[in-house]
Amino acid sequence: GRLALARALVSAGADLDVQNEDGYTAVILARRRGHSHIVEFLLEAGAQTHHTTRWGTSFTDPGSSPKSPLLGPRDEHLEADILHTLGA
């Protein structure tokens, strides 16, 4: 599924730390929605956690946690956004 595609993109040289127009990296997006398997893979592949979004949030902020009350309804397109950020 999506993890296999993420692995293929990383193997093909995808930039793990590229930020989308809002400043999100793939690892921030994955953590934000609780995709722990993708977070783990991206971190092991070398994704950095120091980037911030245009709102000043980062990987380590409570607002990027899947249990955070700051998150809105589940975004059905989030996995596609993660993969798009990696270059899919």
Image: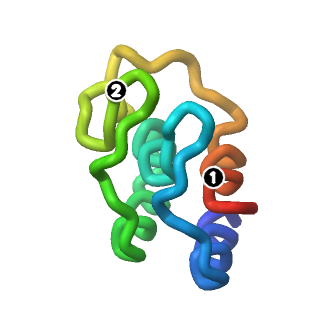
Task: Identify the residue at image location x=43%, y=33%.
Answer: 53
Element type where label 2 sits in the image: loop
Residue 45 vs residue 74: left or right? left
> Residue at point 35% right, 46% down?
51
- Hey, what amino acid is under mark 2? Gly
Q: Nearer the viewer, residue 20 or 32?
A: 20
Label 2 crowd bin: few (<14), some (14–19), many (20+), radius 10 Å? few
Judging by the rendered image, the residue that carries numbered circle 2 is 56
Quadrant (top left/top right/bottom left/bottom right) for the C terminus:
bottom right
Q: Position of residue 68 (x, y in %)?
A: 32, 23
Is 67 drawn above or below residue 87 in the view shown? above
Residue found 50% across the figure and 40% down from its top? 24
Badge number at residue 85: 1
- The type of residue carrying mark 1 is Thr
Image coordinates for residue 10, horizontal then vertical, percent? 58, 76
Left or right, 25 with reference to 1: left
